[in-house]
């Protein structure tokens, strides 16, 4: 796993190695994991090595040291792999400049934590003296929170030694602790979620995820942040292998306000919202567009999701039809609707009237404007591809090389005034027709909304034909498409697949198919309540399943498996 | 009449920065807001012809200012949102010795006795002077005066000596009243502007039946944009020759030589081009009328306010050939830039619409919001934003409602009493007997006209808000505009004297579609 780290910094590697060695000294606890579940098994994959993304890093620091801590510096960019950043996190490394940033960041966070009284020190050594036991107590506590597991004795001794040296040089015990905290913060054991599998006594020859690694998986699944002390305590006690106790921990986390953030993070990932960063539109064509509106568009959909799925425990499929949302001044102007007084300064609940052409998250700007590849026009192809890939988990192939897009891109051609007319001509090229048949019928039915989400009835003075077909069924316009999606079994199946992949940090494989189909059935029996799905995943053996560490093997992907069925 | 969208190329920040720089320039220069309007002087042995009962027998003056070199007053609203609900007392000094400058109409029967008194060189033991508390107030304040403020401040000026430089051809005679001591007779100097409050002018929302359309005002300025072909030439700012014109030849030569290396006469000095270096933007009648270039036009935008003789827009004849007052000129630009950032935003709500093409009764309500307009990167005001109606009495005191009707898609209202239009950094405009004619455009916007009368003296004060700097920036001469406004006055007759205090005017108004919070319906 360490081969993923390209930097040559010796400390970093040594520290990581120490962390991995340290795991082995954690005392095993009695294994009482329930065997009664009727759930099929999943493909056992090697434990992961997943870099914390920027938000996870910041959130973890705030959770451990308090919200006032400022986290400086740039982070290496995320990588989207097979539909999720969460999968990309398991394949990325840290660049050399990224390590420098982590070092700088660690020092500044440690200094803030010590200066701001975020670290309670249970001793008062005399000036110039170093209390190793006290330092070990402090650094051990924060090391456990940062590494998301207890520190091995060798790890703790190494960090205390660093603290002692710094205290000696600076004639300050506090400075020594600061140096120790800084060292913990720049360790790969904090920056990466280092998972480890252990032998599973229930299944001779089998493996499962080590308890603290499972605690992290559950915590990042539900909170998108590090486990808290209660969860680490539960892992240390072996509670996560006792179904009733595991259930209690998961229910506690689902009831926490942090769960909302977890849901936001999941859908941020599933819907590709990292593309909002730097999203640009031609402001000569779309004068209301600016970076603030783009942020608002993203926020609106996330608020809508949380409100429906978390606050109101609604049916996931209703995301495609609900008229209830949240709105602010900028979005009110975009949608040409009045907002309440509260909405002028911030966000306010809003229900689109029935005479408004809005309902469901596809009708919101968060979906309609999220196309980084077209600044001056809408692209039915991209929209159709987005629906296929993000909502239905149906990958669409990239276009072949040397395709001439001139006709599609020329919105001034008087012969082809609408996107439908332009795409119809484009599809006369057989090399293009196949994929466009997948995407365009969906995307063309959304053409009543321009590239930022303004409603329109005409393009270049020509009336827009917003008819479409989905799974062989005809419909008209966005409302019709949303209804078709709401009825489609592929939609809940996709969110189940993505939630599983998000939790385990790898793409679903053919060996996961039975479990996923089982989970989809449970999702239906739970009336498509998203929190019920998250609870089932968090408490399922599927999340804890692991293969012994070893070379990664190529497995038949789940997508391919589904297509082959 | 053009209704093209304003496309000023200068950002608000740059404009305000420029104004701030100008204000800084003026910090060391003498200038003040103009007191243009009647004040009254009583002097033993001088019979006056003032008509108000309180001042019967007093001498009427046409304008005034205090001190030899009047101190600068601040422009409010450049650095922060200004507060209209203040009351500032007079500019008169609290003690002497000091000076009061006044101008007396050369048509006044009191002129000769006063001139005789002046020429005698005698010290006059006492004079009494009265000036309007409203005219003496900071011109950016708006709202009722505190109860203890008299309609006219009165002062006893003691041990007075007069100076009275004569300018042949000037319509008014300047007097410098030097006094050794001053007693305030009915008011006490205040250390700072006093906070006041005001009652709302109406209840909002009012009419709730029928459809409602709201617009955020994106443009408001006098409809004086004569075409270039209608102006034989544009009016011009004063020249250096104007500055030296009233100096004795040898004194002018000395000053020319002295200033030769200094780059000439800046706007800070230019205002002091009256006789004895008196201030001509504060007393514009004391020099000869340079003449105002008026447009040659048989037509102008506006209303037939008095229902006779066609369109009444005399302001068009005064300002039509003044570059800085035209649509792309400095003043409309700066004020509409301020409007664009919501300090405040004016809203026009049309309610009670049963038929947008023909409706016997609709209501037009003029409101304010402190929520800013939003603009595109190209500075176009954007529509469809929501604006909360202001609850601040500074603005609610000026809400106004008009009853109107729509005929063939054109909405015309009956006159209301007045309409006060707020501005950011400027003296604000009150339109008397206002009425509107507006049209809904197919793209959702609105355009129209507001017609009515302005107090012409107040309009002049607006035009010389920054003294000679405005002459320079706008391209006009204060004495020319003053006399032109006075000549063109055609309304608001004084019930006592019959004097015309008003000038007819029309204002272009444009709006983009907007919303006010609608708690009960859509949300």
Image (cartoon, rainbow, N blue to C red):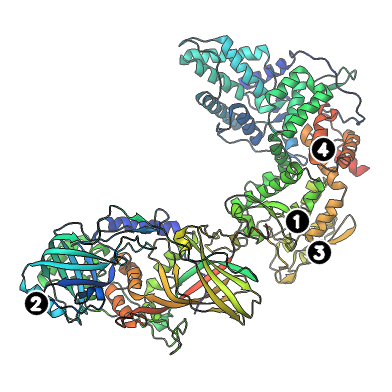
Q: Earlier in the sequence, mark 3 or mark 4?
A: 3
How far from the left and from the top, in percent, is residue B510? Answer: 52, 71
Q: Which residue has dot 2 on it?
A: B116
Badge 3 density bin: few <14, some 14–19, many ≥20, Cα 10 Å: some
Farthest residue, direction bottom: B309
Q: Which residue has dot 4 on it?
A: A533
Chain of the residue where label 3 is placed in the rendered structure: A
Q: Which residue has dot 3 on it?
A: A424
Residue B362 vertical position relative to residue A311 in the rendered view, above or below: below
Q: CA distance from mark 1 to mark 4?
A: 24 Å
Q: CA distance from mark 2 to mark 1?
A: 86 Å
Q: CA distance from mark 3 to mark 2?
A: 97 Å
Report whether residue A372 is seen: no
Q: Earlier in the sequence, mark 1 or mark 3?
A: 1
Left or right: A189 in relation to B321: right
Q: Which mark is residue A359?
A: 1
**Mark 1–mark 4 CB contact (< 8 Å):** no
Left or right: A99 in relation to B345: right
Residue B132 vertical position relative to residue A218 in the rendered view, above or below: below
Single out the mark in the foreground, 3 or 4.
4
Left or right: B290 in relation to B383: left
| Residue drawn at the location 30% of the way across and 72% of the way down | B237
């Amino acid at each position: 796993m360490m081969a993923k780290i390209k930097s040559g910094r010796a400390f970093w590697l040594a520290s990581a190695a120490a962390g991995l060695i340290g795991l082995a000294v954690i005392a095993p606890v009695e294994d009482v994991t329930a065997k009664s579940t009727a759930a099929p098994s999943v493909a056992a994959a090697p434990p992961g090595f997943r870099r914390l993304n920027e938000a996870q890093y910041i959130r973890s620091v705030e959770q451990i040291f308090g919200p006032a801590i400022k986290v400086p510096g740039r982070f290496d960019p995320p990588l989207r792999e097979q539909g999720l950043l969460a999968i990309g996190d398991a394949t990325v490394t840290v660049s050399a400049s990224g390590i420098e940033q982590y070092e700088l960041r660690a020092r500044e966070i440690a200094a803030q934590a010590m200066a701001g009284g975020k670290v309670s020190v249970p001793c008062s050594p005399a000036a110039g003296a170093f209390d190793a036991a006290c330092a070990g107590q402090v650094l051990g506590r924060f090391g456990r929170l940062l590494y998301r597991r207890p520190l091995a004795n060798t790890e703790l001794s190494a960090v205390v030694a660093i603290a002692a040296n710094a205290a000696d040089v600076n004639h300050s015990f506090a400075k020594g602790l600061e140096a120790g905290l800084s060292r913990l913060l720049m360790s790969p054991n904090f920056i990466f979620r280092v998972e480890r599998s252990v032998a599973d006594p229930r299944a001779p020859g089998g493996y499962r995820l080590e308890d603290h690694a499972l605690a992290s998986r559950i915590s990042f699944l539900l909170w998108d942040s590090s486990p808290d002390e209660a969860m680490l305590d539960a892992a240390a006690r072996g509670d996560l292998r006792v179904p009733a106790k595991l259930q209690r921990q998961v229910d506690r986390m689902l009831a926490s306000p942090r769960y909302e953030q977890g849901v936001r993070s999941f859908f941020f990932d599933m819907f590709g919202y990292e593309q909002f960063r730097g999203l640009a539109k031609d402001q000569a064509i779309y004068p209301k567009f600016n970076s603030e509106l783009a942020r608002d568009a993203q926020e609106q959909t996330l608020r809508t999701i949380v409100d429906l799925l978390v606050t109101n425990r609604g049916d996931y499929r209703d995301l495609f039809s609900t008229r209830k949302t949240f709105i602010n001044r900028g979005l009110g102007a975009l949608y040409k609707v009045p907002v309440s007084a509260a909405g002028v300064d911030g966000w306010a609940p809003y229900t689109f009237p029935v005479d408004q052409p809005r309902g469901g998250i596809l009708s919101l700007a968060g979906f309609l404007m999220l196309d980084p590849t077209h600044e001056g026009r809408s692209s039915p192809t991209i929209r159709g591809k987005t629906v296929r890939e993000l909502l239905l988990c149906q990958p669409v192939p990239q276009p072949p090389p040397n395709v001439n897009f001139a006709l599609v891109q020329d919105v001034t051609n008087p012969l082809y005034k609408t996107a439908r007319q332009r795409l119809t001509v484009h599809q006369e090229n057989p090399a293009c027709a196949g994929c466009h048949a997948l995407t365009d019928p969906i995307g063309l039915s959304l053409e009543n909304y321009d590239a930022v989400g303004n409603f329109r009835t005409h393009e270049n003075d020509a009336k827009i034909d917003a008819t479409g077909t989905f799974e062989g069924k005809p419909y008209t316009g966005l409302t019709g498409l949303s209804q078709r999606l709401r009825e489609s079994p592929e939609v809940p199946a996709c969110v189940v697949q993505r939630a599983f992949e998000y939790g385990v940090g790898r793409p679903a494989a053919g060996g996961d198919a039975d479990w996923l189909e089982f989970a989809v059935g449970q999702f239906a029996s739970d009336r498509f309540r998203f929190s019920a799905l998250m609870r089932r995943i968090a408490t399922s053996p599927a999340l804890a399943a692991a293969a012994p560490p070893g070379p990664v093997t190529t497995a038949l992907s789940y997508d391919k498996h589904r297509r082959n069925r | 009449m053009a209704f093209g969208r304003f496309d000023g190329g200068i950002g608000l920040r740059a404009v305000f920065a420029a104004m701030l720089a100008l204000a800084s320039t003026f910090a060391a220069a003498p200038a003040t807001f103009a007191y243009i309007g009647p004040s009254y002087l009583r002097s033993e042995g001088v019979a006056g012809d003032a008509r108000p009962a309180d001042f019967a027998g007093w001498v009427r003056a046409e304008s005034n200012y205090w001190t030899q070199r009047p101190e600068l007053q601040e422009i409010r609203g450049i650095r922060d949102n200004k507060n209209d609900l203040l009351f500032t007392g007079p500019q008169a000094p609290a003690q002497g010795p000091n000076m009061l400058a006044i101008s007396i109409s050369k048509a006044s029967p009191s002129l000769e006795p006063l001139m005789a008194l002046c020429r005698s060189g005698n010290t006059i033991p006492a004079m009494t002077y009265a000036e309007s508390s409203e005219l003496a107030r900071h011109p950016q304040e708006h709202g009722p005066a505190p109860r203890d403020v008299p309609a006219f401040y009165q002062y006893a000026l003691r041990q007075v000596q007069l100076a009275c430089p004569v300018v042949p051809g000037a319509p008014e005679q300047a007097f410098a009243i030097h006094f050794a001591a001053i007693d305030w007779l009915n008011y006490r100097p205040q250390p700072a502007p006093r906070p006041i409050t005001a009652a709302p002018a109406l209840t909002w929302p009012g009419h709730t039946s029928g459809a409602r359309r709201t617009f955020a005002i994106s443009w408001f300025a006098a409809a004086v944009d004569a075409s270039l072909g209608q102006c034989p030439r544009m009016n011009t700012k004063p020249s250096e020759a104007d500055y030296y014109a009233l100096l004795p030849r040898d004194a002018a030569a000395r000053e020319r030589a002295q200033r030769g290396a200094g780059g000439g006469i800046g706007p800070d000095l230019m205002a002091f081009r009256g006789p004895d270096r008196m201030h001509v933007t504060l007393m514009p009648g004391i020099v000869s009328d340079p003449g105002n270039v008026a447009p040659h036009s048989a037509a102008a935008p506006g209303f037939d306010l008095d229902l006779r003789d066609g369109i009444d827009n005399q302001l068009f004849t005064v300002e039509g050939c003044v570059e800085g007052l035209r649509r792309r000129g400095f003043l409309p630009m700066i004020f509409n830039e301020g409007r664009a950032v919501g300090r405040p935003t004016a809203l026009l709500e049309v309610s009670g619409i049963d038929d947008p093409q023909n409706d016997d009764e609709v209501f037009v309500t003029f409101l304010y919001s402190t929520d800013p307009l939003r603009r595109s990167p190209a500075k176009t005001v954007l529509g469809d934003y929501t604006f909360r109606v202001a609850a601040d009495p500074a603005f609610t005191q000026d809400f106004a409602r008009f009853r109107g009707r729509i005929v063939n898609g054109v909405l015309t209202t009956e006159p209301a009493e007045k309409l006060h239009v707020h501005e950011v950094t400027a003296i604000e405009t009150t339109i008397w007997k206002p009425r509107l004619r507006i049209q809904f455009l197919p793209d959702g916007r609105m355009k129209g006209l507001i017609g009515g009368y302005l107090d012409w003296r107040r309009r002049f004060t607006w035009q010389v808000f920054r003294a000679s700097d405005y002459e320079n920036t706008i391209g006009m001469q204060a004495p020319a505009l003053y006399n032109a406004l006075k000549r063109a006055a055609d309304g608001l007759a004084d019930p006592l004297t019959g004097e015309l205090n008003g000038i007819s005017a029309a204002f272009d108004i444009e709006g983009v579609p907007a919303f006010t919070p609608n708690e009960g319906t859509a949300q």
